[in-house]
Amino acid sequence: MKAKFKRGLKKIPRVWSHMSVQTGMGAPTLDFVLCVDGLFVAVEAKATAKHQLSALQQQTVRAMEGCGAVVFIVHDENVELVLNQIGLLASFPKAAW
């Protein structure tokens, strides 16, 4: 699922993405950190909608959103929807947000 999401991101213009590898050192993050035409976007990937965020992931989401980030939770059932929403963010001029 992460590979499918990653391939989809490459089709969206003005998106820079980074998929971090957690080592236990440094600040926690989510699976994908994106810059969508200047907007900070983070994405946590879960295998299915039934899988929930851990307490640390919930804390990380709150911290990112508190700084103005847009956060998505992506899973097999909503990959295309999330990619479409990210594509919409990339299509708005910066002044819109």
Image (cartoon, rainbow, N blue to C red):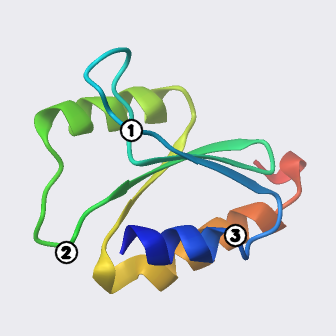
Left or right, 77 with respect to 11, comes to: left
Q: Position of residue 41 (x, y in %)?
A: 57, 47
Q: How far apart are marks 2 and 3 (CA)?
A: 22 Å
Q: Which of pointers 2 and 1 lies earlier in the amino acid sequence?
A: 1
- Report the quarter where the N terminus lies: bottom left
Q: Residue at x 62, y 66 (%)?
A: 86
Left or right, 16 with respect to 19, comes to: right
- To which quarter of the image does residue 67 belong? top right
Name the residue tied to disc 3: 10
- Three-letter amino acid code of the residue under disc 1: Val
Of the numbered discs in the image, which one, if any, rests on residue 21?
1
Left or right, 46 with respect to 40, comes to: left
- Three-letter amino acid code of the residue under disc 3: Lys
Observer-nearest residue: 53 or 93? 53
Q: Residue at x 70, y 62 (%)?
A: 89
Label 1 crowding class (10 Å Cα cut-off): few <14, some 14-19, many 20+?
few
Name the residue tied to disc 2: 48
Residue 83 versus residue 21 in the image, above or below: below
Label 2 crowding class (10 Å Cα cut-off): few <14, some 14-19, many 20+?
few
Q: Where is residue 46 in the image (x, y as percent from the top left)?
A: 25, 63
